Image (spheres, grey):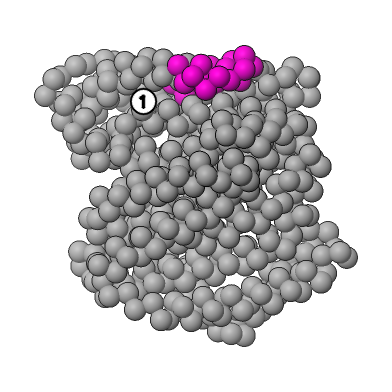
Amino acid sequence: MTKINNIAKNTSYLTLALIGQKIISFTYFTILANNLAPEQLGKYYLAISLTTIFAIFIDLGLINVLTREVAKRPFESNKLLANVLSLKIPLSILTVGAVILTTYLLGYETLTKHLVYISSICMILDSFTTTFFAVSRGHHNLIYESFASILFQLIVMSFGLWALYSGFGLIYIILALAIASMFNFIYSSLILRFKIGVKINLQYDKKFFWTLIKLAIPFAGYAIFQRLYTYLDSVLLSVLANEMYVGIYQIPFKIIFALQFLPLAFVASLYPALSHYWLHNKEQLLISFKRALNYLMIISVPIIFGVIVLADKIVRLFDSAYNQAILPLQIIIIALIFIFLNYPIGSLLNACDRQKKNTFNMGLTVVLSVFLNLILIPMYQAVGAAITVLVSNMFMFFMGLYFSSKIMDLKLKSNIIVFLKTLASAIIMASIIYILKSYFNIIILILIAVFVYFLFIFIFRAIRKEDFISIYRALIKKGKI
């Protein structure tokens, strides 16, 4: 019972931290976008995107392995950590060298190169911080990591705003990230030593070392594909268009990225339940999966229609220089339903020991994404990148659904009915908001939209009393879906 309570507490801590982190991060982004020209914002996020892609080559799936193995063998925590650190130090040196070489090959100007170099410092520090917290996770302790994620964003925003309003420029703004990363590195190492009781040292045990690498390979494949898929579009925009369009693209990208805390929080409870039902109750596995699809459709569809109708008002929250982001936002937000539904589909495949299918799907999606970006970005710039996000997420959804149907007989008729009822409710909501949008500010319009949407959801009986009870069990009882 104590372990179950710890899991519930850890899930709650991480969920709340994730929500808080997204709110602070998006607030900070909004302020930056209102004070930086699209080209400046593009340079800033290009540096972050590039190093975020390369960061995976320092990790190579070792974080997941470390957490899992520490959870299995907590008495070997020191040995596991020491061997992982011995591998990550040379990987860090090689990765930084690869980042520097890439910036020269891509021909970035001096300012962009300096931003990338500073971001590379953050990349290394964050990688080791994540390693330390991976051990903490293995010991079923997420409270310190949850606290650190919030504090990290507060430090970034505090120093970043100070640099912004003091007129110090992009170099000092990105230094705020380095300061926050240094704090997290020191904090996590102290927590590991004095709260978890694990020492930080280096050790090379040849047999142990290669066992870790073999265990990490399946995780590494998926992680590399996922990181490329998420951040490569910004890099390709900088090369095939220019850094101004990277800045324009950040508006829709950040909005859709921020909204993903909703399925993330839900799947945190769904995944262990699916894993349990796969072994013990196949009928409940199907019921839980189909309910998850319904819930995430009910959440995502009104957001899509609301954002499409209010896109001009949303973008006008930023500086007028970002008005070109309206159409990319309207296109990319349609992908939200596929992004949301891909979470339970991915969880189902992992829970049912089909994780290789997930990696396969992500790999194909990355290939499609790169291909489409190479064609569409030179033609349509940020709009082309947005179309790519929509098409590639749709592709991954149908691929995932295909492999899910191999696990169990889905029979999605009931889900289609819920989707149609949800769609009808969202269309009515959007129509009313479109008529009223000239008369009210965006906050009032959102409140009206929520009321109208849920009114028609109940009228059409897309959601019932027992569904609310199930959602309560999923999010409050942690896993009883």
Magenta-colored span: 101-124
The N terminus lies in quadrant? bottom left
Residue 75 image offset from top left, x and y in percent: 20, 31
Task: Give me the residue at 56% from left, 26% from top.
Answer: 47
Figure check: 169 above or below 291: above
Residue at x 65% of width, y 52% of height:
329
In the picture shown, does residue 477 fall above or below 206? below
Note whether 411 is above or below 293 in the view shown. Answer: below
Disc 1 designates what residue? 58
**428 with respect to 467 (left or right):** right
Q: Position of residue 185 (x, y in %)?
A: 46, 22
Specify whether residue 132 is in view: no
Q: Residues within 10 Å of mark 1 (few under 14, many from 20)?
A: many
Q: Residue at x 39, y 63 (%)?
A: 398
- Say which residue appears at 11% left-offset and 24% top-offset: 207
Query: Residue placed farthest to the right in the image?
Result: 439
Left or right of 134? Residue 233 is right
x and y percentages locating residue 382 in the rendered image? 63, 44
User: For residue 90, which quarter of the picture?
Assistant: top left
Point out the residue furthest to the left here: 207
Residue type, mark 1 in image: Ile
Q: Position of residue 458 (x, y in %)?
A: 60, 82
Q: Of 345 and 273, which appears nearest the observer? A: 345
Q: What SS does tag 1 mark?
A: helix
State the residue in front, 196 or 239: 239
In which quadrant will I find the C terminus? bottom left
Q: Nearer the viewer, residue 22 or 403?
A: 403
Reply yes or no: does residue 114 show up in magenta: yes
Q: Is residue 1 magenta?
A: no
Task: Determine the main secondary structure of the stretch shown in magenta.
Answer: helix
